[in-house]
Image (cartoon, grey):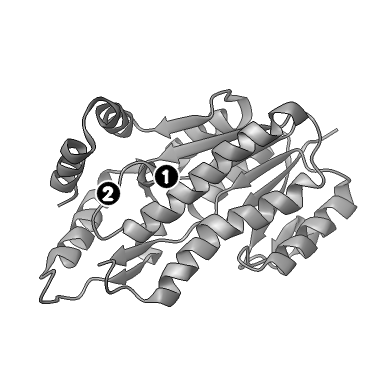
C-alpha cells in the first residue's frame, strides 16, 4: 500500500524537487499550494495562511486515502528591508506563511496521522543565524523551528517523528520572489541595497534545488535527530555560534553578510 505524503509549496523550487523524490520512492504526494488546480492529480488549491482552506483541503485528502503518513512543511515567504521601515502587512504575510501556515497544516494533518508518521519542517539556517535587514524572515523561521522542536516532544509518545531541517540559501526563485524594501534612507544609507546585491551576487554559487532536495529528503524520511543543518559552510557557522559569545558571533555574521 502506498504511503500518503502532504507537501506545501510543491509546485516550484525545492518543493517540486522534494515532491519528485517522494513520488520516485513510491509515495502518493498531495500538494497544497495556491497555484494548484487539479484535485484529480492530488493538487489542492489552498492558501496555507487560511485555516479554513487548509482544513477543507486536508479533509479531502483524508476522505480519499483514509490517512496521512508524512507531512513536509515547505511553504515560506521572504522579506528584505530595514526592520524599522518594512511594511507591517508584509511582516504579517511572512509569519502567516512560514509560521501560521505550518501550524495550520500540521494541526489538520495530525488528525489523520498514526504511529509511524513523520513531520518535517523545512526551516532555514536563518532560524539560528540573524542577518541584518532580514530580521523578519529570521524571526519567522526561528518561530517555526521552535514549533517543530516542541511538537517533537509532544508527539514522541504517539510514535510520530518530527524533524526540523535548516538549509542555507538554495538556488531557486525564492530569493527573487521575496518582498524587498531596499531604498536608500538617511539612517541606513545604501546598506539594505548592498544586502540585496550581496544575495544576488551569491545566488549562482548556491546549492542547486535538486542537490539540496536529495540531502533534505534523506533527513525527512530517515533522519532521527531533532534538527539538521544542510550545507558544510552553514554547519561550520553553527559550530562557531556554539563556541563563541553572542556578541562575537553577531559581529562575524555582519561581516559575512555585507
| Quadrant the N terminus occupies | top right
Q: Which mark is residue 124?
A: 1
Q: Residue at x 47, y 69 (%)?
A: 92
Among the 4 quarters of the image, the one containing residue 158: top right
Of the pair 150 and 95, the residue shown nearer to us = 150
Element carrying mark 2: helix
Q: Residue at x 49, y 62 (%)?
A: 95
Q: Residue at x 51, y 35 (%)?
A: 216
In the rendered image, residue 154, in percent from the top left (x then y), is placed at: 67, 35
Please give left or right for residue 54 compared with residue 149 in the image: right
Of the pair 258 and 85, the residue shown nearer to us = 85
In the rendered image, residue 8, in percent from the top left (x then y), is placed at: 61, 54
Element carrying mark 1: loop
Q: State whether residue 41 is above or below residue 82.
A: above
Please give left or right for residue 220 compared with residue 46 in the image: left
Q: Confirm whether residue 124 shows in the render.
A: yes
Among the 4 quarters of the image, the one containing residue 91: bottom left
Look at mark 2 in the image and give the residue it sits on. 204
In the rendered image, residue 42, in percent from the top left (x then y), is placed at: 75, 55
Q: Residues within 10 Å of mark 2 (few under 14, many from 20)?
A: few
Among the 4 quarters of the image, the one containing residue 78: bottom left
Q: State whether residue 174 is above or below residue 248.
A: below
Amino acid at each position: 500500500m502506498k504511503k500518503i505524503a502532504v507537501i506545501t509549496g510543491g509546485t516550484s523550487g525545492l518543493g517540486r524537487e522534494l515532491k519528485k523524490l517522494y513520488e520516485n520512492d513510491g509515495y502518493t504526494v498531495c500538494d497544497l499550494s495556491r497555484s494548484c488546480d487539479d484535485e484529480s492529480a492530488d493538487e489542492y488549491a489552498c492558501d496555507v495562511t487560511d485555516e479554513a482552506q487548509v482544513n477543507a483541503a486536508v479533509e479531502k485528502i483524508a476522505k480519499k486515502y483514509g490517512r496521512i503518513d508524512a507531512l513536509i512543511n515547505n511553504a515560506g515567504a521572504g522579506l528584505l528591508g530595514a526592520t524599522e521601515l518594512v511594511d507591517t502587512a508584509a511582516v504579517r504575510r511572512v509569519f502567516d506563511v512560514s509560521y501560521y501556515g505550518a501550524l495550520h497544516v500540521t494541526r489538520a494533518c495530525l488528525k489523520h496521522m498514526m504511529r509511524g508518521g513523520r513531520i518535517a519542517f523545512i526551516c532555514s539556517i536563518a532560524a539560528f543565524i540573524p542577518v541584518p535587514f532580514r530580521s523578519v524572515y529570521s524571526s519567522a523561521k526561528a518561530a517555526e523551528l521552535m514549533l517543530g522542536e516542541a511538537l517533537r516532544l509532544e508527539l514522541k509518545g504517539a510514535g510520530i517523528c518530527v524533524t526540523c531541517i535548516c538549509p542555507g540559501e538554495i538556488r531557486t526563485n525564492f530569493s527573487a520572489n521575496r518582498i524587498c524594501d531596499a531604498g536608500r534612507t538617511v539612517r541606513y544609507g545604501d546598506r539594505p541595497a548592498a544586502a540585496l546585491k550581496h544575495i544576488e551576487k551569491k545566488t549562482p554559487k548556491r546549492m542547486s534545488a535538486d542537490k539540496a532536495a536529495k540531502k533534505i529528503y534523506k533527513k525527512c524520511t530517515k533522519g532521527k535527530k531533532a534538527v539538521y543543518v544542510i550545507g558544510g559552510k552553514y554547519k561550520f557557522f553553527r559550530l562557531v555560534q556554539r563556541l563563541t559569545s553572542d556578541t562575537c558571533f553577531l559581529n562575524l555574521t555582519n561581516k559575512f553578510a555585507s
